[in-house]
Amino acid sequence: MSNSQDIIIGIDLGTTNSEVAVFQDGKVTVIPDDRGHIILPSFVGVADDGSLLVGEAAKNQYPLYPERSVRSIKRRMGTDDSIEMAGQSYTPQDISAIILKRLKAIAEKHLGQALSKAVITVPAYFNDAQRQATREAGEIAGLEVVRIINEPTAAALAYEADQHGSKNILVYDLGGGTFDVSVVRIQDQVVEVLGSHGNNHLGGDDFDQKLVDHLVRHLHTTQKVDAHSSRQAMARITRAAETAKIALSDQPFFTIEEEYLLEHDGQPVHLSLEIARADYEGMIEAYINETLEAVHTALKGAQLTVADIDEVLLVGGSTRTPLVSERLEQEFKRQPRGEVNPDLCVAMGAAIQAAMIAGQEVSAVLVDITPYTFGTSAMGEIDGLPSIHYFVPIIHKNTPIPTTKSEVFYTLHDGQKAVDVEIFQGEAIDARHNTRIGSFNIEGLSNVPAGNEIITRLSLDLNGVLNVSAVEKSTGLEASITIDNALRRYDRAELDSARSRIGALFDQEDVDYDDGGTASGSADSQQQARDLVAKAERLLDQATPEDREEMIDLIESIRDALATSDTSTVADDMDTLADILYYLES
Ligand code: AMP
């Protein structure tokens, strides 16, 4: 057992932001400062009066007084560079130590005790000199660095600390200014980096810049104004670009409004421009392609292929961009996981590693997520044929809740007056294979040609209440419903009705076993029972421990019945097992 003196903190010392976390009472806490902020910008500065600034205050003064401020010191760790700040010289270790000392103080205040030990994370590609410099920075800050661990290792621990057995994991880390991808293998809590690649100068800042260029071009074309002529206007445009980018992660359109941006020929210049997510995605696509090339290089380095990867983990704020997860899902044929806050995941993993070193029993980070996907149906292609039942997910399963997401849809006919919005829970491409949990109409739409934009918005809260609204974009006309209990499991009758609707479309293996409520002892039903058992055995690994136990009991009872050639006695068991498999596959 550890005692309180043994507390080891976990620190993510990042290029743009840093965090400190601790594992206590079975869970990880990212530690807030006095003002409740859990993210410390990795900026150091000297104020007017000569006092030292760390974090937000140093970040704020950076654009005004760059000669008195330092940013991105991580890029210079391990070099002999001399860093000038307010007329004094510092080593990169000194500057990093100032950040570490602040994190140490934040943790000490929160925990109410002195702390002297830390685990600090570094990128997988850091060489010996860079790691040594990080260790020295810790020592200067008064911290014994009990271990330096790789950032992807920390991310893997945040997700998989309580996994036993072996897993290959791809950690895709896209932050503000850097991109790293690593392939790691975790085996009984020990993580090994098998391959790693990246670009030290690619990230969300580049996405912002694409939008900034777009806005500057727009001002030039529409108002013949050169925004570059005003530093203040450029600063506002840059901030607005980041705000738009973040909003476009959750909604299909965002309007940038900046009044009195600057003066031109004595007239005020306003900026008002709507950006569609689809257009923004076109702007950043080349960057995403570049990251995917790096993914393949990392896989090659690890001597693995896409098929060998068991999990894809998203780290870094920019991975909230939907295009990132979409492209990774296409590539790996599995949904990447981003449920542990991608900004905090590395610090959390560092805290888990720290607790392991201190001899504590650890567990992976737990978050409230939706176990189901919610969406609606629209015109699309199913098996290469056009269908109006194409399922469009809006909130994907494993998304942390509460959450709000919206998508745009288009009317199909000229003069279309109404749209029927149906909401489904499930994963199937054909919406009719999913469970319909609600529907409503939006009526009185404008008399316009096909292609009228309707925005469907889903908000899911922690109690499973799903609010759905549909808005005609051009007029703001709105209709909505509330679905209570969207997170509950469906009961028997609903399942039966869902199954009978789709029964005809299921292939032979998935045929339902109800057969009027009882299975017979015929040769057919024995074959069904054998198929069911075989399928259950195949899926055992994917089940939760609770389901697995139940499945094993059911398999045994069905096997016993098969031995007597009479499966009619286990009809209920077969039903129950079929139900569990149904959930496992959906
Ligand atoms: P990090 O360096 O990991 O803290 O990531 C910071 C980057 O993530 C910045 O470029 C942010 O603008 C970006 N970011 C944060 N939230 C989002 C979001 N919801 N969608 C897209 N980018 C985001």
Image: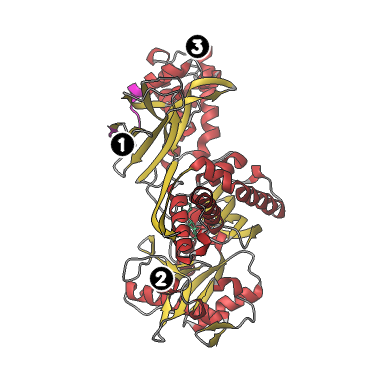
Tell me the quarter of the image containing the N terminus.
Answer: bottom left
| Callout 2–callout 1 Cβ contact below 8 Å | no
**In this rendering, would 305 be left or right of 231?**
right
| Separation (CA) of disc 2 from disc 1 | 36 Å
Is 505 in front, or is 452? 452
Residue stretch rendered in magenta on the structure = 482-494
| Picture quadrant of residue 267 | bottom left
Q: CA–CA distance between discs 3 and 1?
A: 48 Å
32 is within the stretch colored magenta: no
Nearer the observer, 223 or 29:
223
Is 261 placed left or right of 191 in the picture? left
Under mark 2, the amino acid is Glu
Q: Residues within 10 Å of mark 3 (few under 14, many from 20)?
A: few
> Disc 3 residue type?
Ser
Spatial CA span between label 2 and label 3: 73 Å
Q: Mark 1: is the Cβ under 8 angstroms from ligand 1?
A: no
Q: Residue 241, image x and y in percent?
A: 47, 54
Mark toward the viewer: 2 or 3: 2
Residue at mark 3? 522
| Residue 345 circle label | none
Residue 467's disc is 1
Q: Position of residue 435 (x, y in %)?
A: 39, 26
Q: Between tags 3 and 1, which lies in front?
A: 1
Q: Dot 2: what SS?
A: helix
**Residue 577 in view of the camera:** no
Q: Which residue is mark 2?
A: 56
Residue 484: in magenta span: yes
Q: Secondary structure at mark 3?
A: loop
Q: Nearer the viewer, residue 432 or 528?
A: 432
